[in-house]
Image: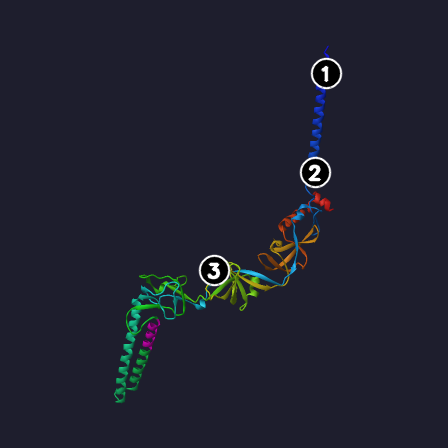
Amino acid sequence: MPSLPSMLFRRSSFATLLIAGAVSACALLAGCGESAEKTAVAAPPAPPILQGKQLRFPTGHPQLALLNSVPSRPATDIVADLPARLVWNEERTQRIYPAFGGRVVAIGADIGAVVKPGSVLARLASPDFGAAQSDTTKAGVDVNLARKVLARQRELFDAGIIARKDLEQTEADLARAQAESARAAARTTLYGAASSINQQLGLTSGIAGVVVERNINPGQEVRPDQSGPGAPALFVVTDPSSLWVLIDAKEIDIGSMQPGTTFELQVPAYPGETFTGRVIATSDSIDPGTRTIKVRGVIANTDRRLKSEMLVTARVREKMNGVVVPATAIVLERNQHKVFVQVQPGVFEPRMVTMGHMGNREVVLSSGLAAGEQVVADNALLLAREFSVAMEDAGNPTSPQANQAK
């Protein structure tokens, strides 16, 4: 028979086991309750329902916080930013090419030099120009000889020795010699001295300005056939106090870019400053590669802060009719533009619209939307995806959404 102390030890051990089992059971039940609670929290929200053309979200749906809506406003004057580039004013620019072949013997002006009409930029030793000078001299000799012959013929005609037709032929020979002499002299005078044969051809400036480009070196051989499309000029002289602005305008902007229209230039090199220009010409064709219209403007540059080939932005103000919405609200679907209108809280419907003007931040809609309507400005693509999913579910009669819609 077991002793009393051993019996008491067994009872206390059994009680301890019972208590441990109860604690484990409570912990297990608590864990099950927590899991059930977590399962209930992690349950997905009810999806939106498509009713007709409207998509209805349940109250408190988490995606509603992402679909920010803003009211559309009437369009008045909008600002359009167009890419542009500064170039030399070709009405005040001269590109100098050689009229005769030869070798460069001296450079008279370098880049940055201020020149006047007639200033010698470079001098060439040109046998071709020497031949032209020789032709001028020979033409002058022929004129002198023709005059002497005509004087003798008149004496003979007065004496009755020759016929009138011989006199008239001599007069015609003198007229032809004079014409050839004038032509040869004009050619050589245009490029240099016509009174001597020195073969020195001077490249001169025909305008007042600044030498902005030089593509010639001493000892270089130049030829007239080197001048052509794409070939660099030996010298470029321009008046930098006026520059051209080449603007790439979209088709919808052409109405605001007529000759005489003023615009503002924004130059990255001078942040916060604006320069005012004026449109002087508009192209009659559209560039097939970029689908833009070339617009040419002119801008004053008396302080010469602006430089040729600068990339700038031309800002013009355009009068538009319609409503203005953020550019992020536009969704493109099958070559058509649409927006999503919030007709009431949590209810959205698509609306096909017509673009009047597309800017970087805002667009103008000429039709399809009234002023004051709430347009989804953020995550419009997300809403378009929800519409697509809802339409697919509505076409499936076994889906929960289709049953809920019924």
Q: Quadrant of residue 205?
A: bottom left
Name the one closer to the observer, 10 or 90: 10
Mark 3 crowd level (few <14, some 14–19, many ≥20, 10 Å Cα): some
Answer with left or right where residue 61 lies relative to residue 126.
Answer: right
Residue ID for mark 1 = 8
What residue did someone put label 3 on? 310
Magenta residues, start to end: 179-190
Q: Which residue is mark 2?
A: 40
Nearer the N terminus, badge 3 or badge 1?
A: 1
Total count of labels: 3
Mark 3 and mark 2: span between their CA atoms?
Answer: 63 Å
Residue toward you, 402 or 203: 203
* The furthest residue to the bottom: 159
> Which marked residue is nearer to the observer: mark 3 or mark 2?
3
Q: Nearer the viewer, mark 3 or mark 1?
A: 1
The residue tagged with tag 2: helix, strand or loop? helix
